[in-house]
């Protein structure tokens, strides 16, 4: 008998796709995050099972046509998770319980989609409402109160292999 290695299931939120495909930023922090994203894509992507959602596809389709084409190219072929009634209910609970502000309902939906689909990680650069240390405990509590184990919410830097 041998131990089978289980591949991590990673939900990639739209901000990661945007950092990967955007022109290099002049802002040093954003530029560093873009570089980390490219390194993660080159070295870690093939070692995990990647998922996006219909929401990621929709968000990736907005903006400049050239940028849209680049985003579509990098997400082509990834497994796509639907926006299910369970995900909508959990997103509504995240907002109703004030774990996520009402104006960030789409961010709540990203968290809910990853959660109800049993993702191990939710990869994001959205520090305002998703990878927010102040909000994280409440987000996790609402997920658990609704019968779900939340994914680890992290950035590509945090999900690098050592």
Image (cartoon, rainbow, N blue to C red):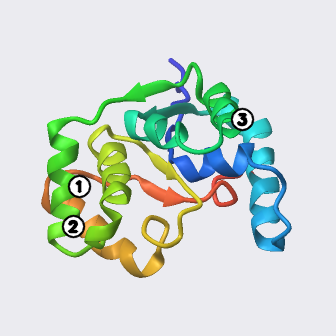
Question: How would you rate the neighbour count of disc 1 (Cα within 10 Å): few for under 14, some for 14-19, many for 20 or more?
Answer: many
Residue 86: % across, % down: 16, 41
**30 or 8, which is in the foreground?**
30
Name the front one of labels 3 and 2: 3
**3D distance between C-alphas at marks 1 and 3:** 31 Å
Residue 99: % across, % down: 27, 73
Which image quarter: residue 101?
bottom left
Q: Could you tell me which secondary element the residue under label 3 belongs to?
A: helix
Which image quarter: residue 85?
top left
Q: Could you tell me which secondary element the residue under label 1 belongs to?
A: helix
**3D distance between C-alphas at marks 1 and 2:** 6 Å
**9 or 4, which is in the foreground?**
9
Q: Can you say whether 17 is above or below 99 in the image? A: above
**3D distance between C-alphas at marks 3 and 2:** 34 Å
Q: Report the residue marked by disc 2.
A: 95
Horizontal placement of 28 versus 88: left or right? right
Residue 93: % across, % down: 15, 61
Q: Could you tell me which secondary element the residue under label 2 belongs to?
A: helix
Question: How would you rate the neighbour count of disc 2 (Cα within 10 Å): few for under 14, some for 14-19, many for 20 or more?
Answer: many
Residue at 32 percent of width and 43 percent of height: 113
Horizontal placement of 9 versus 74: left or right? left
Residue 105: % across, % down: 30, 60
Horizontal placement of 70 versus 154: left or right? right
Q: Report the residue marked by disc 1.
A: 91
Residue at 71 percent of width and 35 percent of height: 66
Circles 1 and 2: CB atoms closer than 8 Å? yes
Name the front one of labels 1 and 3: 3
Q: Report the residue marked by disc 3.
A: 66
Circles 3 and 2: CB atoms closer than 8 Å? no
Question: How would you rate the neighbour count of disc 3 (Cα within 10 Å): few for under 14, some for 14-19, many for 20 or more?
Answer: few
Residue at 37 percent of width and 45 percent of height: 114
Q: Can you say whether 153 is above or below 3 in the image? A: below
């Amino acid at each position: 008998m041998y131990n089978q290695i289980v591949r991590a299931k990673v939900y990639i939120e739209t901000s990661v796709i945007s950092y990967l495909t955007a022109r290099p930023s002049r802002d040093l922090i954003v530029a560093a995050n873009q570089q980390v994203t490219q390194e993660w894509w080159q070295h870690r992507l093939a070692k995990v099972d990647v998922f996006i959602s219909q929401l990621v596809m929709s968000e990736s389709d907005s903006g400049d046509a050239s940028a849209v084409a680049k985003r579509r190219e990098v997400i082509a072929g990834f497994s796509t998770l639907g926006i299910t009634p369970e995900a909508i209910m959990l997103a509504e609970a995240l907002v109703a319980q004030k774990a996520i502000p009402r104006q960030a309902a789409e961010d709540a939906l990203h968290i809910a989609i990853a959660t109800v689909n049993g993702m191990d990680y939710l990869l994001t650069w959205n520090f305002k409402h998703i990878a927010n240390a102040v909000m994280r405990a409440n987000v996790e509590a609402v997920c658990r109160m609704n019968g779900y184990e939340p994914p680890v919410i992290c950035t590509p830097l945090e999900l690098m292999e050592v």
